[in-house]
Amino acid sequence: MFGIPDPAIWVGYLLALVFTLACLVYGLLNWNNGVDGEQDGS
Amino acid sequence: MAVDTGLFVGITLVYLVLVIGLGYLGYRQTKGDDDYMVAGRKIHPVVLALSYGATFISTSAIVGFGGVAAQLGMGMIWLTVLNIGLGILIAFVIFGKRTRSIGNKLRAVTFPDLMGKCYGSSFMRYAAGLVIVVAMPLYTAAILIGGAQFITSTLQVPYNTALIAFAAIVALYVVLGGLIAVMYTDALQGGIMLVGMTILLVLTYVQLGGVIEAHTALAGMSDLVPEALAAGGMTGWASMPAFGSSIWLTMVTTLVLGVGIGVLAQPQLVVRFMTVRDSRALNRAVLVGGPFILMMTGVAFTVGALTNVYFYQNQGMIALAAATDGNVDTIIPNFINASMPDLFIVVFMLALLAAAMSTLSSLFHVMGTSLGFDVMRRTDSGKTAMRPIRIATVVMIVVSVVLAFILPGSIIARATAMFMGLCASAFLPAYAHAMYCSRPSLRAAKISLVVGAAAWFVWTAFVHVKESAALGLSNLLFGVPAVLSAPWQDVDPLVIALPLSTAALLVGWVLDRHEASADTEESAGAA
């Protein structure tokens, strides 16, 4: 994958992208949560 | 340097005017201790995310660790996985929200202050403050060296002049403007870094004929691995080192785990969680922080490894051979200077300058507040004045500059890993315990902090050969550079000290609970 033959490397790249996507999704889903006194989604 | 010096000087002056302007804005908005130390607890989420990211990512990450990726290959991408997974997701969602809410409730203004107030103990405050005051100058000096090296190689100014001017400019806005100035300038610097790293990634792939082509070419260079590195377990630049080999242990335990986990208990990052009004700001910051870190370390490690393809195709040598005096910290600057268009050299130079300044400013600020507020404060009233903190900041800056003149040039990545390893070993279990236990055990935290710091020091000074040989204590006392042989001497201190400090915390906590329940039973029996 990505022109990299060693899975131990391309899995790292894949995970880095997945975690970045997780940050984006988390931020969007909780965009308005967490104002003091409200449930903050954590 | 290929770039027109006039162009570079002009753009740098504009940048410096902006930085000083933001510093002045911070100075004007700083009216009291809360403003100086936690930016008035009203920072915008985007400023928080960029400031956190820009502080997190220094020249160490780009030049130092990029250079290490050029030497050891793409396995460094696992550090990016931890940087985003732990450094952003876990840090903000698990630790950040609790830190903000507890810090706000207790009116804590620094990391040692937070620890002291959570545990109701001045020992915790002093101990955390002392670890920062003693160890952080090493990391700060490494950041100074990284910045000065790049200024020297790009502007052709004497190294000493570059180092002193660099420290003086940052010192000016940190001392006067406090954390508001630091975070505003960080946000500007983070933006510049994002632009620089994005262009660097795109231009590198364009130069090498595309993503797949570049990676395939790198994978095809495995037979060019130098004999010494192959003997240490290196198999190529697009593959992991042999499992359990000396290079594998260094990459996985020191660089990936040491830095990846260490970030969770970095005082200069933890204090940022206390600068926002509510958890919503932290949620929003996650959205910006994740992609930002990917574009910083992910790009630095990828481009670092790919410099081998560039140097081989254009100069018939691997990146390590293209390094000045064999110093891996020079690989990325040499690659940029050799391969990129003039204008981009200026942009990247600014990005590196920004990366160094943003990290440096935060370290100056944390060292100053730790010394002036946490260590030297005479009473527990929490009352203080900005003047002693400003004086303490100047003192710590001078110490760091002196250290930068003493330390060797090739220290950037190692000093970063050492500092992060020490922070995690000493602080992480006690910090997590304070955040997630309604009645945290002071005894457990004390034992954990002392055991973590001591274990880290012993392993660093007597076992981990890369440091113990340089420190010379092991040689002085036992006549050998490291008291244990391979593979132990390649295992990073964090891998030993963090489990020990965690175990120490658990033992102390269980003992405390056991005694508490015995006391309760005794009182019930007496009644």
Image (tube, helix red, strand yellow):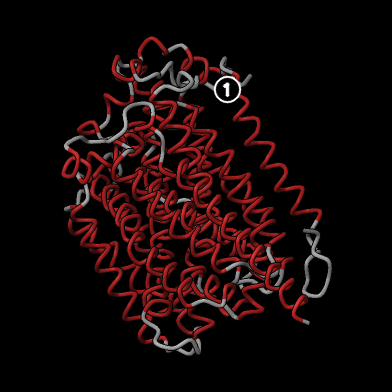
Identity of the residue drawn at 72% across and 44% down: A22
Crowdedness near tag 1: few (<14), some (14–19) or many (≥20) residues, C-alpha within 10 Å: some
Position above or below: B199 against B102? above
User: Which residue in the protein does label 1 denote?
Assistant: A8
**Amino acid type indicated by mark 1:** Ala
* Whole-percent x, y for residue B275 in the image: 59, 72
Q: Of B131 and B177, which appears nearest the observer?
A: B131
* Residue A34 in picture, x, y percent from top left: 78, 67
Q: Is residue B34 visible?
A: yes
The chain that hosts pointer 1 is A
Query: Does dot 1 land on a helix, a strand or a loop?
Result: helix
Quadrant containing the N terminus of chain B in the rendered view: top left
Extreme residue toward the right, this view = A39
Query: In this image, B225 relative to B266: left or right?
Result: left
Residue B340 is drawn in which quadrant? top left
Seen at 27% across and 31% down, the residue is B323
